[in-house]
Amino acid sequence: MPLLQLVDIEMAYTGNRVIRGLSLSLEKGSIGCLLGPSGCGKTTVLRCIAGFEPVSGGQIQLDSRVVSAKGVHLPPERRRIGMVFQDYALFPHLTIAENVAFGLHEDTRERRQARVAEFLDLVGLGAQQRKYPHELSGGQQQRVALARALAPAPNLLLLDEPFSNLDVELRERLSYEVRDIIKATGTTAILVTHDQHEAFAVADEIGIMHEGLIQQWDSPYNLYHRPRNRFVADFIGQGVFLPGMVLENGKVQVEIGTLSSEVPIECITGCSTCEKSCSVDVLLRPDDIVHDDSSPMRAEVVHKAFRGADILYTLKLASGARVLSLVPSHHNHALGERIGIRLDVDHVVTFQGREAGAGALQLVQLPG
């Protein structure tokens, strides 16, 4: 049985529906993530799970017990949920040890001291017990907040944009550390973020949210390689849509070459299996376009972004359409240079072609 289950939950503010029949399921010991742009409702879902907001429809179940439903609302303090906030919410007048001990008031003094020492050691701050929050860095304060949330052994841990106040390098490093710490304790957790790099680093399963609904709840791998709809394809990673035409036997032709698909290709009429000559839009990621000097297919370098180990090239095809290609950085080509490219696609992702202007390129240049 799942530890956490949301069944068609609804939530509205002054008549405006923020959450629209949202469902998800999270197994014990798993780390889930709600990922989406600002205003999609992800933090509202977290607040409903925590008990800070009532639901107007559906159910929230914790360990098979209904904690939220229409007319049912178990208060937050009785849900055995730990919370890590965006701004850490540490008590400035308490030492680090006293902050971690805050939720352990029902334990004996000896038990409380042992738990504090155990969890400060777990987050690598065992030597900082007597310091105050202002004496620690932002990353250290976040680890204290994590230790405080985990020390009472909650059934579920909620993390609300926990790395947003940190610089990029520290955010990336700490996200891996937080995953290791949560996994070491066997805690079930849900992270809320708008940053897909954080989501990929921390979570086992991710729900892509848009307008109060989860568009796809899946592994990071499947979200990137097998997006369920255009919104997920647009939001996750980088890529372009190129117009294509369905051939036979699951093949689709694009300007750069021919691809073979193992799944039915959705055509312009919305049928589940395409007929020959139907038009589709084909998603191509930067890792699908390989730089190959021996290839007869050439493309012009119109933009380049140096990333250290690799360079992200924007390349213009003969038709004027543009694609992205991720190339090892020792292949350093000049703007205006024409380079050889070829397709190397393991997962063919196609969507129904646009009836109006289906041949036009839709460039997807995404944040993160």
Image: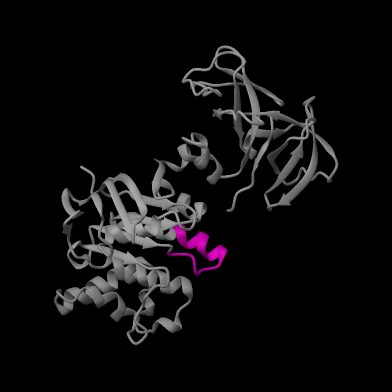
Picture quadrant of residue 120: bottom left
User: Magenta segment: does it hold 166?
Assistant: yes
Predominant SS along the magenta part: helix
Please tell me which residue lies in front, 197 or 319: 319
Task: Residue 102: give x, y in percent of width and height.
Answer: 25, 77
Residue lying at 72% horizontally and 52% vertically, measured from the top left? 306
Task: Residue 352: give x, y in percent of width and height.
Answer: 55, 28
User: Magenta segment: does it hold 243?
Assistant: no
Residue lying at 20% horizontally and 68% vertically, measured from the top left? 77
Residue lying at 44% horizontally and 73% vertically, measured from the top left? 140
Q: Is residue 143 visible?
A: yes
Please tell me which residue lies in front, 240 or 278: 278
- The single residue placed furthest to the front in the displayed view is 15
Task: Residue 163: give x, y in percent of width and height.
Answer: 47, 64
Q: Is residue 182 visible?
A: no
Stretch in magenta? 162-176
Task: Residue 307: give x, y in percent of width and height.
Answer: 68, 52
Is residue 39 toward the left or the right of residue 145 in the image? Answer: right
Residue lying at 19% horizontally and 54% vertically, measured from the top left? 70
Picture quadrant of residue 349: top right
Vertical placement of residue 97 versus 17, above or below: below
